[in-house]
Image: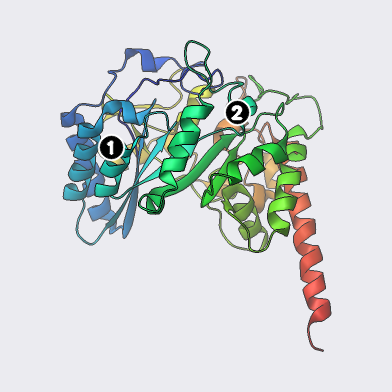
Amino acid sequence: MLLKIHSRCNLACDYCYVYQHVDQTWRDRPRTMSRAVVDLAATRIGEHARQHGLGRVTVILHGGEPLLAGRELVGHVARSVRAAVPASTAVDLRVQTNGVLLDETFLDLLDRYDIRVGVSLDGPEAANDRHRIFANGQGSHQAVAQALERLDQHRYRHLYGGILCTINLANDPLDVYRSLLTFAPPRMDFLLPHGNWTTPPPGRRTDSAETPYADWLRPIFDEWYATRPQRTGIRLFESLIDLLLGGSSGSEVVGLSPSDLITVETDGAIEQGDALKTTAEGMAATGLHVRSSTFDEAIAQPAFRSRQSGLAGLAATCRRCPLVRVCGGGLYAHRYRAANGFDNPSVYCPDLTALITHIRSRLNAELAALRGRSPG
């Protein structure tokens, strides 16, 4: 469950999928989630956990920039959710922040409520500050770097969830990767910029078989994979390795596992994931509200169900592809085309194919070497 506790941001990133894409419904929503809406959302979370006998729920505080909601509201969210969820259900509370406001006072609060922290950063200063800037044009890297250094202190390290990095083809991939490693993240993830067949992502021509994003990710994979033990986890790579070895994905970007994300906006509206806001106005909306509707009612809607249908819900091209159980058709929002909705492969299809093939070849080579060293 993703709770949008604040709908505005203190940065003005020019690629932001909330503010810079087609869906502008954020403009009509309250800046901050009220305590009443927090309590209603918490009640729905508890209700859902109880009805389905969930052993664990993950609740992500999000925005905009969630820390703009203030320490008092963040604390109230933690108390309200934990009070609403049955004792048999573990609550995994997280916050995804740009890090600008992550001072020791906030970290002490997050420690008190056991809220893990993910921070967004796009690499070294020159790389990050191409896009992750304040409204006055000033870069954010220095402030975020200081926050990450605080988070890596011994007394806060247990809260450190990892770093989220959006890929920018203009940045050198190994410079980005190595600079992020200096902050000793337990995990990191590299995000493909949101785009689709109607509005392609930067550098991705829809009429081309070129693979600029796979080309960018390959050197990072090779360096990460060759380092033993690995210095950090990388969710996309780990998910692809698990899938290639017959396991499941830890990411909705790849694999056939159904999406398990539901969003509550600052006004209490129940929605699908934000990535859908890059496709068309209102695409993430359900028309439901936590005041009067359960999460089961939202999940029962056709728009939600289409994301739960696995292989059967993919385009015919994807179903015929030998990599389909690994790729999974890519992120749902990346399949969109105005002419026919989501009945398409990912706009990143060539990149995903090239990346999966590369990782598979590395795994096969290592397995062959292990077999060669096996007795008999």
Does 4 sit above or below residue 305?
above
Residue 336 x, y percent position in the rendering: 59, 27
Evaluate whether residue 290 shows in this view. no
**Pointer 1 or 2: first along the chain:** 1
Determine whether the residue tagged by mark 2 lies in a helix, strand or loop. helix
Does 245 sit above or below residue 310?
below
Question: Residue at coordinates 25% horizontally, 36% vertically from top-left?
Answer: 74
Residue 219 x, y percent position in the rendering: 76, 45
Question: Residue at coordinates 77% horizontally, 44% vertically from top-left?
Answer: 354
Can you say which quadrant of the picture contains the C terminus? bottom right
Q: Residue 193, located in which quarter of the rendered image?
A: top right
Evaluate whether residue 139 shows in this view. yes
Tag of residue 105: 1
Q: In this view, which residue lies farthest toward the bottom?
A: 376
Q: Residues within 10 Å of mark 2 (few under 14, many from 20)?
A: some
Q: In this view, which residue lies farthest toward the top?
A: 136
Residue 238 x, y percent position in the rendering: 61, 55
Tag of residue 193: none
Mark 1 and mark 2: span between their CA atoms?
25 Å
Task: Please state if 353 lies on the left or on the right of 242 as rendered.
Answer: right
Where does label 2 land, which residue?
125
* Amino acid residing under circle 1: Thr
Q: Residue 273, located in which quarter of the rendered image?
A: top left
Determine whether the residue tagged by mark 1 lies in a helix, strand or loop. helix
Task: Please state if 237 lies on the left or on the right of 69 as rendered.
Answer: right
Does 227 sit above or below residue 171?
below
Does 104 sit above or below residue 357?
above
* Amino acid residing under circle 2: Glu
Task: Please state if 209 lies on the left or on the right of 14 as rendered.
Answer: right
Tally the numbered discs.
2
Question: Residue at coordinates 26% horizontally, 45% vertically from top-left?
Answer: 45
